[in-house]
Amino acid sequence: MTKSYNDLGVEFKYLIVNDKDQKFGLWVNTVGFQAIQPETPYPLKSHPSGYYFNTQKGRTLREYQIVYITKGRGLFTSDSTPQKQVCKGRLMILFPDQWHTYQPLHQTGWNEYYIGFEGPIIDNLIRNSFISKDNQILEVGLNEELVSLFSRAIEIAANDKISAQQYLSGIVLHIIGMILSISKNKIFEIGDVGQKIEQAKIIMNENVFKDVDTEELAMKLNISYSWFRKVFKDYTGYAPAKYFQELKLRKAKQLLVETSHSVKEISFMLNYNSTEHFFSLFKKRTGFTPLEYRSFGRDTEEE
């Protein structure tokens, strides 16, 4: 029996925006990720009243939102867009004061990344037709870099450090620039092969705290493992298992510098066989012990 991938659960953050944040010209109100399993209710009731909605009645928001689907499929409708199917690799752009509704198909569920924002910078982009209500569903494909931007935004919002809003604003502009480039210039129309690899990379990213059996992953993607291993290495420079270990190492570095978790806790969180194995692998790959890296990383941040 194959494992279920891309199912992290739910992570979201609603942010406080002050007067200084608004003077920057762009601010973020909410950012999150939801893995909606098949045959489960949608939306989840844990969201505040301003965001929770009845899919039959729809809603209006006071902000812009970008909602990116990386698994499953569903439907979207707005007062300017007749009902359209939304599947993995597509994103929805929501506009303030515009009625809309969307939901995953009950039999498939979906995974969604979203970020809600507002401000005169975005208003100006709309006035100049960079984004339009006439084209609310954009085809961008499965793209690991885009997922990484959403994931980083969630991390920044959760840490809630000084100037987090300005950092998040930069991420929003990066996301917008990227999706415009992809959707309008079609630079990532790389065919089924590229999409399979991008999907595999996203699955690995979303399961960095678990184990990913790369042979089962190839089976999940309906491709042979020998072909998958060769093409993945040609595409990324790493064999699939090696790439996944690099992702775990990158996450370990982040946890060492940005959290107070012990080395043992981080080893457990990232599902290493033992603390000793994690320690040995980390030292071999970085030249530092985990504690040396933590000390070095925090000293660098303070400079």
Image: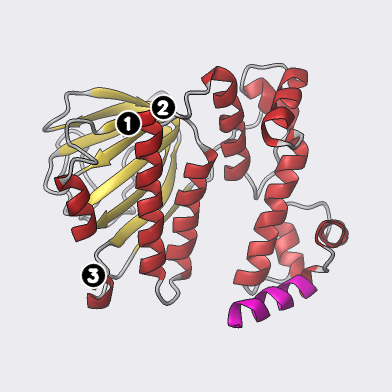
The reply to whether the magenta stretch includes residue 294 is yes
Q: Which mark is residue 186?
A: 2
Q: Residue at x 71, y 73 (%)?
A: 294
Task: Tell me: residue 94, above or below residue 172.
Answer: above
Q: Quadrant of residue 228?
A: top right
Residues at marks 2 and 1, CA–CA distance in whole angstroms: 11 Å
Q: Residue at x 23, y 72 (%)?
A: 23
Quarter that holds the C terminus: bottom right
Residues at marks 1 and 3, CA–CA distance in whole angstroms: 28 Å
Q: Nearer the viewer, mark 2 or mark 1?
A: 2
Mark 1, residues whose alpha carbon is within 10 Å: few (<14), some, or many (≥20)? some
Q: Which mark is residue 138?
A: 1
298 relative to 180 in the view: left or right: right
Tell me the residue that label 3 is attached to: 22
Q: Where residue 208 sits in the image (x, y, percent)?
A: 64, 47
Mark 2, residues whose alpha carbon is within 10 Å: few (<14), some, or many (≥20)? some
Name the amino acid type tagged 3: Gln
Chain part drawn in magenta: 292-303
Q: Main secondary structure of the magenta part?
A: helix
Which residue is at the front of the view, 6 or 299?
299
